[in-house]
Amino acid sequence: MSTVRVGVVGAGTIAGFHLAAYSKNPDVTIVAMCDTNTERASERAREFGATAVFSDYREMVASPDIDVVSVCTPNDTHADVAIAALEAGKSVLIEKPMTVSVAQAEAIVRAEAANPGFVQIGYVRRFSSNAVTLKTFIDAGDLGPIYYTKATFLRQAGNPGGWFSDRSIAGGGPLIDLGVHFIDMCLFLMDFPEVQSVSGYTFAGLGNRGNIRGLTRYMTADYDIAQNSVEDLAGALVRFTSGAVLLIDTSYSMHGRDTQFFEIYGEKGGATLEPALHITTELHDTIVELTPTIDSLSFDVDEGFQKEIDTFVRTAQGAGVPVAPAMHGLHMARILAAIYESATLGTEIRLEPLSSATLLN
Ligand SMILES: NC(=O)c1ccc[n+]([C@@H]2O[C@H](COP(=O)([O-])OP(=O)(O)OC[C@H]3O[C@@H](n4cnc5c(N)ncnc54)[C@H](O)[C@@H]3O)[C@@H](O)[C@H]2O)c1
């Protein structure tokens, strides 16, 4: 297999996970780092042996020494960086959320279709053993037709501050940051069903909870207790044209315990994915509880990133089709936009059918 030469844009927290996984893949050479903060880019370059450092992503993606690009910058910049990379002939691994708007998502879909490279969105949870195992069971029909998914991703004091709490950069709060993982998991497990309507709600009465003492949590460098323009908590009921429903809630701030819970119900069986994989089904008119014997029954972050990166590299080498193309990001952008719009208007939002043919003509 040919060597894949990598450039990473954004040298912050998540870039560290990408770089650690790239460095463990024998088919990869980490060539370049780019960050508007050149000191941070240089530090990462030294740590992972990259020979080139850029402060402008346009210069980096133009380099003939790079085959693929990881986009690890704040949410509102993903589209510009990814489109520049695709137009320069590179493939891109774009961190979630792919974009902060439907228009940006449509632009990436078009750029992916018009250029030789491909898009993989960083939906890392799809690669953990528990999700891979559950997907295998669902694809084999063991759960039967899926009609209901219930997902909860709550943090009591989890607002990271900085750009994450600036709506104009992040595109929203916990919904676009945390909820996106579980909405994608639902779409992925159900094979991207068409959305019919969305009824969403948000609350913002608690703020960023910067007052909380005695609790260690992730805070960005530019954390400012006075700054916060995102929701504390968001939730939605998403109806699919099949009749199936997704019920989701997610928070940065709330008076409750940190919770991750994902359940999916089919006519022949149901499963809990988080906090640990478990399957409930029926055999010979008897309810049967199944616990698979696999590496990790819960989301394993290191396994997830390694397999996400290894899959991206293998696809760049020409083996297999892209697993999380830009269309998956467009599905997501439409749902997120509808949830926020529904929350603002206080009414249900109906979605037009999504047709890639119309979009690409
Ligand atoms: N997959 C996951 O579970 C996961 C977890 C955390 C973050 N993320 C995503 O990763 C992305 C980055 O998050 P993070 O926590 O690493 O943020 P961060 O703030 O730690 O790092 C972002 C970096 O991008 C740099 N940057 C900003 N604009 C730039 C530009 N135009 N060109 C080059 N560099 C630029 C910043 O200087 C900073 O170093 C976000 O989209 C976030 O949602 C994903």
Image (spheres, rainbow, N blue to C red):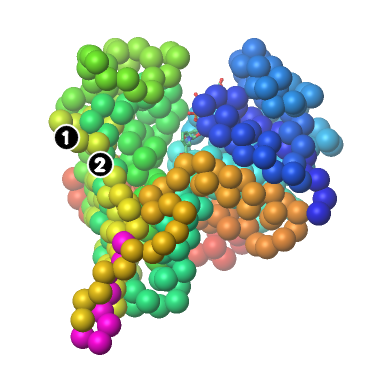
State which quadrant residue 159 falls in: top left
Q: Is residue 315 visible?
A: yes
Residue 320, x across and y down, in percent: 68, 63
- The C terminus, quarter of image: bottom right
Q: Residue at x 31, y 68 (%)?
A: 290
State which quadrant residue 133 falls in: bottom left
Q: Is residue 311 above or below residue 288?
A: above
Is residue 119 one of those drawn in magenta? no
**Residue behind mark 2:** 259
**Residue behind mark 1:** 256
Residue stretch in magenta = 278-285
Query: What secondary structure prevails in the magenta region?
Result: strand
Residue 250, x across and y down, in percent: 27, 41
Q: Residues within 10 Å of mark 2 (few under 14, many from 20)?
A: some
Label ID, residue 203: none
Is residue 279 one of those drawn in magenta? yes
Amino acid type, label 2: Thr
Residue 256, x across and y down, in percent: 16, 34
> Which residue is outermost to the front?
293
Residue behind label 1 places its C-beta within 8 angstroms of ligand 1: no
- Does the CB distance between marks 2 and 1 fall below 8 Å? yes
Q: CA distance from mark 2 to mark 1?
A: 9 Å
Q: Is residue 51 left or right of residue 120?
A: right
Q: Secondary structure at mark 2?
A: strand
- The N terminus, quarter of image: bottom right
**Pick the front one: 266 or 280:** 280
Q: Residue at x 27, y 20 (%)?
A: 215
